[in-house]
Amino acid sequence: MRRPHQPYADAFAHHRIDLMVPSVEAAIAAQLRDMGLVTLDGLTSRDAVLAFATRIMHLVPHRDSDSDGLTTIRDTRRHPHRAGFAGFGHGELAPHTERSGTPNPPRLMLLVCGQAAVTGGESLLTDGQAVHTDLFLGGQEAGLALAQPRTAFFGAGDGHTTQVFTVHRSQRVSVRLRLDRLARWSPIVQPHLPQLRTAAVSHQITLALAPGQGYLLDNERWLHARRAFTGDRLCWRALGNPRIPMTRGFAPAPEAVPPAMLSEAG
């Protein structure tokens, strides 16, 4: 099996911001706007993760969050085969964005390692900008189809009808995706799903997080996944909306957005 493409020799170091530098919030804001991804270390307790998260975002509570707004991610062994709960098992996770089945997914996701797995468990991140470019430059048919409004339904009975790529009137693009049993597709996009899956994997970067290390990503730009693992892997996750101004989505490659492709979302 071909190993995923790794564009950086050390992806964690490439995206890292030192939390001890002066005006760290401004540095994080600038990198989120530019790259959509920040890696961090030194968050060695749940309290430290919560304190940092509340500096950066307004936490959004949801089904799986605890009373403080964080979500404890570990193998609960309670529902390994239940759709929508795969993150609480030990298996691999396909590339996805958070809360894809809701009308307004949170803009930011923070994930911090509390305890590493014995084997596996690496985080796999994909820049949606690279996926978007791949699908448009490969003949445009896949990119155009996946930007057609209302061609996907994500979630259970109370899910959301949407599309993988939303092209805003600013010509910036947001991505929304899941590839599990809670994703249903229009016949328009069905032929392009293999190409979408290939692009989502081929651009992955790998983060083997140690305790206290984590990443903060723009949930309208980056996909995340996970390798299967053994052992008592423990992570804390925060979802929320930024306390800093952020423009919707990402700027695509100039040749990757035909002017006529404007979604109803605006």
Image (cartoon, rainbow, N blue to C red):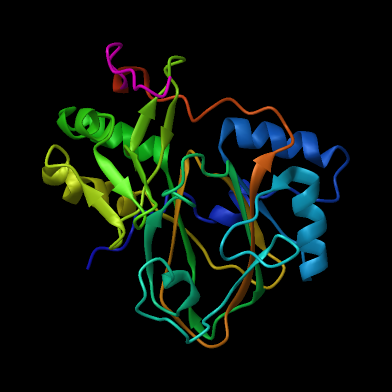
Residue at the spot x=43%, y=19% of the render? 266
Vertical relation: 100 (above or below) 49: above
Residue at the spot x=30%, y=11% of the render? 259
Residue most extreme to the right: 22
Query: Is residue 78 visible to the viewer in this orientation of the structure?
Result: yes
Residue at the spot x=72%, y=44% of the render? 57
Q: Residue 164 falls in which quadrant of the image? A: top left
Query: How many discs appear?
Result: 0
**Residue 56 colored magenta?**
no
Q: Residue 44 falls in which quadrant of the image? A: bottom right
Would you say 35 lies left or right of 82 here? right
Q: Nearer the viewer, residue 47 or 99?
A: 99
Vertical relation: 152 (above or below) 172: below
Query: Is residue 198 visible to the viewer in this orientation of the structure?
Result: no
Q: In which quadrant is the N terminus drawn? A: bottom left
Q: Nearer the viewer, residue 83 or 191?
A: 83
- Measured from the top left, where is residue 102 in percent x and y? 46, 46
Vertical relation: 165 (above or below) 81: above
Specify the segment rendered in magenta: 257-266
- Measured from the top left, where is residue 214 in percent x and y? 65, 60
Residue most extreme to the front: 157
- Measured from the top left, where is residue 206 in percent x and y? 47, 60
Q: Residue 110 falls in which quadrant of the image? A: bottom right
Q: Main secondary structure of the magenta part?
A: loop
Q: Nearer the viewer, residue 220 or 200?
A: 220
Would you say 64 lies left or right of 89 here? right
Would you say 109 lies left or right of 179 here? right
- Measured from the top left, where is residue 221 in percent x and y? 47, 39
